[in-house]
Amino acid sequence: MRDALGAPQSVLVLGATSEIAQATLRRLAGERMRSARLAVRRPDAVEAFAGELRGRGVAVEVLPFDADDVESHPLFVEAALAGEQDVDLVLVAFGVLGEQSESERDHMAAVSVLRTNFLGAASVMTVIARRLVAQGHGTIAVLSSVAGERVRRSNYVYGASKAGLDGFAHGLGLALEGTGAGVLVVRPGFVRTKMTAGMDAPPYSTTPDRVAEAIVEGLARGAHTVWAPRGMRLVMSVVRHLPRALFSRIPA
């Protein structure tokens, strides 16, 4: 259960190598988080981070997780949450950027991005939602992207995967109303991480720490959507309504 101040005490992270996920857990560790389960494709990739959290008094378990293996998701969730009375927060942080030009040359490259970012996330969120409804509380926080707000030519495969994820997450949140469970959709702009290293950072770019700050603040006030930085909400409200002829001229 969340503590008396509303801070999550038990957290499950799907995609714990994510720099945003790790920044979020560092903040939660400073706000009375007691246990964290780190789910990743390669458990050895987060052992150093797990050690860091343990050094701060957090009970940590590292679990193997394959977002693309949708048939394994029910058993994964059952095993991941075994022994826990409940889970306060599930952070869905996995995803791939892909290479747009490769996706245009090879349809399977496009399928891979869509499978991970949309199908994999929708699958595991559906299973987790049932668990949260059964326990009567808990939040799924999912990393979407402003790239899904209006899909651009330069990254339409990735953007489409995030648009699907964003729509699914909001629909799931509506379906969970009245159950005690909920969904927080996180819409970062361009985030300066290892995944985006070498790319030109556009205006309103941000950092994992700033996105983590927005997530923790959103959880505290029971929000259903947060933007990082906040100004992206206004920017995208304009972009969404640009005429096609103008939108197509936006630089890649």
Image (cartoon, grey):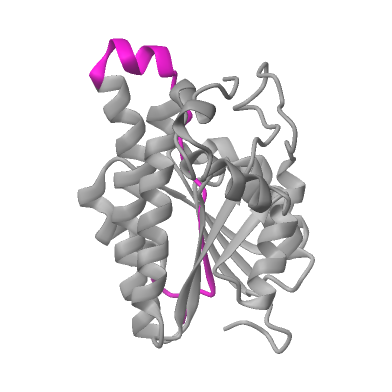
152 in the magenta segment: no
Q: Is residue 17 left or right of residue 128?
A: right
Q: Is residue 96 left or right of residue 221?
A: left
> Which residue is painted at 62% across and 60% down in the image?
226
103 in the magenta segment: yes
Q: How many marks?
A: 0
Res. 194 image quadrant: top right
Q: Is residue 109 left or right of residue 145?
A: left
Q: In the image, residue 210 lies at what x, y percent?
A: 76, 49
Q: In the image, residue 126 lies at what x, y percent?
A: 30, 63
Give the residue furthest to the left: 71
Which one is nearer the viewer's eye here, 235 or 87? 235
* Quadrant of the image containing the N terminus: bottom right
> Which residue is painted at 46% across and 25% down in the image?
155
Q: Which region shows up in magenta?
A: 82-107
Res. 113 image quadrant: top left
Instruction: Look at the image and tell me whether residue 54 can be seen.
Output: no
Q: Is residue 60 left or right of residue 14?
A: right
Instruction: Look at the image and tell me whether residue 29 can be seen.
Output: yes
Which one is nearer the viewer's eye here, 155 or 221? 155
> Which residue is painted at 63% across and 75% down in the image?
9
Whether residue 96 is situated above or below residue 37 in the rendered picture: above
Whether residue 166 is situated above or below residue 1 in the rendered picture: above
> Which residue is painted at 61% across and 68% down in the image?
35
Q: In the image, residue 93 lies at what x, y percent?
A: 52, 48
Whether residue 68 is situated above or below residue 196 in the rendered picture: below
* Quadrant of the image containing the C terminus: top right
